[in-house]
Image (cartoon, rainbow, N blue to C red):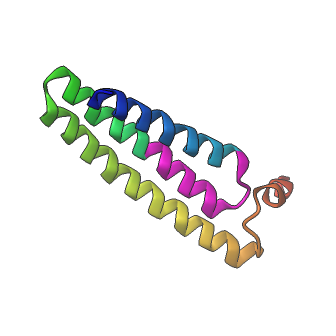
Amino acid sequence: MTQMTILVAGVIGLFGVGLYGLLAMRNLFQIIIALQVLVKSAVLALVMAGYASGNLALGQSLGVTVIVADTVVAVIALALAVQTKRVLGTLDVKALSTLRR
């Protein structure tokens, strides 16, 4: 196996785990973690694409940019989840969907 084959398998594996977590979980915290795993697979794919094209620095800089933006999104999502738990007393997505007007 070559190094690129192992990286592609890692990207596909991380994406699969993240997608499964996103579709199967009902807790808001677990959904946020699943989204983080999905984004990490995208970062790995960006760095891998940079390596494959011979421009590793570009792939790494794009990866760092995605990580910074993703961290901001994760912090805001976690803050909203904490406030949801404080106000409504639950983090279950199905229970929250009944709150529509």
Q: Return the residue nearer the eye: 30 or 6.
A: 6
The answer to whether 69 appears left or right of 95 in the picture is left
Q: Percent x, y for residue 72? A: 39, 57
Q: Return the residue nearer the eye: 43 or 82.
A: 43
Q: Quadrant of residue 66?
A: top left
Q: Percent x, y for residue 33? A: 54, 57
Spot the residue most to the bottom.
86
Magenta segment's dominant SS is helix
Q: Quadrant of the N terminus?
A: top left
Residue occupying image coordinates x 72% and y 66%: 91
Q: Percent x, y for residue 45? A: 35, 33
Vertical position of residue 52 compared to residue 29: above or below = above
Q: Is residue 57 magenta?
A: no
Q: Quadrant of residue 29?
A: bottom right
Count of numbered circles on the image = 0
Residue occupying image coordinates x 36% and y 33%: 6
Magenta segment, which residues?
24-39
The answer to whether 99 appears left or right of 49 in the picture is right
Vertical position of residue 92 compared to residue 24: above or below = below
Q: Percent x, y for residue 26? A: 74, 56
Q: Return the residue nearer the eye: 1 or 68.
A: 1
The answer to whether 55 appears left or right of 39 in the picture is left
Spot the residue most to the top.
53
